[in-house]
Image (spheres, rainbow, N blue to C red):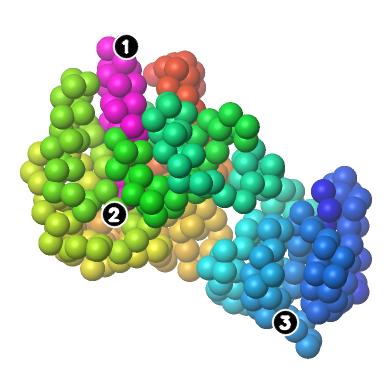
Amino acid sequence: MDILIIDDDPFAIKLLRQQLNRLGFKAVTQTERAADALVLMQNNSHCFDMIFCDLQMPEMDGIELVRNLAEIGSVSRLVLVTGEDKRILQTAELLAKAHGLAVVGALNKPVSPQQLRQVFQQDLCRLTPSVLAGHDGYRADRLRQAIVCGELENFYQPKLDLTSGKLMGVETLVRWHHPEDGLIYPDQFIPLAEQYGLIDALTQVVLNQALHHARQWRDAGLKISVAVNVSMANLSHVTFPDRVVAAANKARFPLTALVLEVTESKLMSNQRVTLDILTRLRLKRINLSIDDFGTGHSSLVQLHDLPFNELKIDKGFVHGACRDNSLRAIFEGSLEMARKLGMKTVAEGIEDSDDWNFLLASSCDTVQGFYIAKPMRAEELLDWHTLWTRRLGK
């Protein structure tokens, strides 16, 4: 891995470089000026795998560098580092992500070896075969072919009752098995499906597959709910509720055990139609979850206007909340609001024992995350459930 350190403090560079070397990373370039880093990347066509960037620098600060990295189309994974207030670091991270940069870490100085190890461990989890191959996008006609030819496969992440630890349901997460690029994750193709009118066909394939698997689990004695992500773009045709009901009836799956997680990747294009569809879904006893609450377009207005009966708190407000007063306040406020509105709550992003112990002391209903289980294939769920039940001693 080729790494670049940008920091105006020579001692900070030396310390970080030594820590990286101890972790086995020897190809480390350093510079004390952001402008010099840009020259390296532009004039020498040098593409670094990862960039560690200090925010507080003279001449060109880290925020200016972020803007410039976006302008030159940098694909390097970015780690922001600063000795400034944690709120400044959080805002800088959001800004870099808004520019479309691949932010894999935001660290306070002095950076510890443990923080570095965590960055690289999480980075490996984020990397998909398509990213490793350096693919820069797919064509709509190729995605259409994938939908028709059965190249999409559902993976499922367990959702547990927080109090008992019992498996309550799963979230459906679609993957694309690309013949050349391997396993492609949804952030690489869902926006394309929305942009070119393929999202309805894609969602139908995912829904049918999820209901089929859920029926198989029920036949094997595992009666759990199944959640499927739908985009606001799906909610533009008044026939959507009827298609969902028809698919569930065909699979002989109870509507009360179906959850539709609405992801707001785009604003409502037609509020009247969306209200019509969501209200009909709830009248049919299908559960509606507002996904990634607190991010994107999700807002208090949506909770007030739309008939959601579940609130899913984004992992950005869950992971690390035990150590961050701001995250804790947002998380606890979301739980309290959901309780007063009579909504169930789901916390996603449980990545370590600290997150788990923090959640145990909360009033959250359901939890999911890598600490519990990573997304798995349908045929793996029953075996996982057996092992998990043994672990619980039940």
Q: Position of residue 371 (x, y in %)?
A: 54, 38
Q: Please check the rendered image and state whether residue 211 is part of the magenta-colored stretch, yes or no.
A: yes
Q: How many marks can you see?
A: 3
Q: Choose the circle earlier in sequence order: 1 or 3.
A: 3
On the rendered image, what quadrant is the C terminus found in?
top left
Image spot of residue 93 (x, y percent): 59, 68
Residue 258: image x %, image y %? 23, 34
Which residue shows up at 15% across the image and 24% down it? 249
Marks 2 and 1, the one that precedes in the sequence? 1
Residue at disc 1, secondary structure: loop
Of circles 2 and 3, the one toward us is 2
Name the residue: 59% across, 77% down. Answer: 88
Q: Which residue is under mark 1?
A: 220
Decide which of 321, 14 is in the foreground and name it.
Answer: 14
**Is residue 174 at least partly visible in the picture?**
no
Q: Nearer the viewer, mark 2 or mark 1?
A: 2
Question: According to the image, label 2 marks what residue?
Answer: 232
At label 2, which amino acid type do we have? Met
Q: Which residues are magenta?
A: 205-231
- Mark 1: amino acid: Ala
Taking 363 as reference, is 24 left or right? right
Q: Amino acid at mark 3?
A: Asp
Rendered residue at 40%/42% (across/down): 367
Measured along the vertical axis of the image, is residue 268 above or below residue 263?
A: below
